[in-house]
Image (cartoon, rainbow, N blue to C red):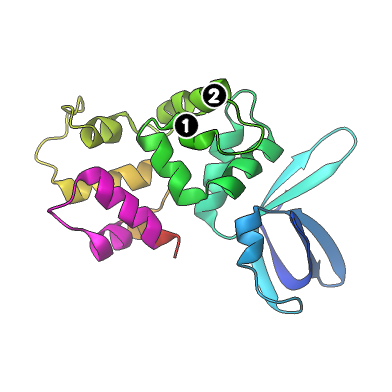
Amino acid sequence: MFYYLSGKLALKNENFVVIDVVGVGYLVYMATSSIANMPSCGDEVKVFTYVNVKEDAVDIYGFCSEAELSMFKLLISVSGVGPKAGLSVLSSIGLSEFALAVITDDDKTITQAPGIGPKTAKRIVLELKDKMKTDDAIGTIKGMPKAGPVQGVNAKNEAITALMSLGYANLQARQAVNAIYNAELSIEDNIKNALAKISE
């Protein structure tokens, strides 16, 4: 329906904001961490959006970055995970920690989100690993041999590839990895540090 909203921040609540776009106030549900990082009311804001159309309502979900929106879309593509549950995950865990949890098969971290039990968390990891095609990255992180045909790819490029598999743009992934890369650290640690750098 629309990709983003740009206007004045009219109201901040616990789990939603209202954005005034040319005199029309849009109620937008957002992660609590995203709301906390929003500017003061009256300031100009831009949020990327996902519109959920139901029989009795049209709900708008907002995100501070395209990466967060992409991760949300992947989350709600998992069977049994709706928009509210997806937002709960991003609110409770955060984008970087969630991405790392998927890469490292850490379903216990995902259960920190209200409404996400062990079975759902395992399903999220299982389905997103496949959809994000991170099998090669996960194998590398755990020290297992890569099954793919690519040869001679160094650890830095493998970290970049892992970030791109999570939905980050090539340039964004390269800039983040280049900024923090340490050859003495494991690929897992470099990915974790790059994710933290992106979320700054």
Tell whether position 140 is magenta: no
Q: Which residues are magenta?
A: 174-197
Q: Amino acid at mark 1?
A: Lys
Q: In this image, 161 relative to 22: left or right?
A: left
Residue 45 on image: x %, y %: 67, 71
Q: In this image, 63 relative to 19: left or right?
A: left
Q: In this image, 122 relative to 30: left or right?
A: left
Q: Is residue 66 above or below residue 23?
A: above
Q: Quadrant of the C terminus?
A: bottom left
The reply to whether residue 167 is visible in this rendering is: no
* Residue matched to label 2: 118
Q: How many marks?
A: 2
Residue 105 on image: x %, y %: 38, 30
Crowding at dot 1, Cα within 10 Å, few <14 / some 14-19 / many 20+, comes out as few
Q: Residue shown at 75%/57% (left/top)? A: 14
Q: Residue shown at 66%/74% (left/top)? A: 39
Q: Are marks 2 and 1 in contact (CB under 8 Å)?
A: yes
Give how far apart the Cα atoms at labels 2 and 1 are.
7 Å
Magenta stretch, main secondary structure class: helix
Q: Is residue 115 above or below residue 169?
A: above
The reply to whether residue 193 is visible in this rendering is: yes
To which quarter of the image does residue 158 belong? top left
Element marked by disc 2: helix
Q: Amino acid at mark 2?
A: Pro
Q: Residue shown at 18%/51% (left/top)? A: 185
* Residue matched to label 1: 108
Crowding at dot 2, Cα within 10 Å, few <14 / some 14-19 / many 20+, comes out as some
**Which of the two residues, 152 or 86, is positioned nearer the viewer here?**
86
Q: Is residue 103 above or below residue 160?
A: above
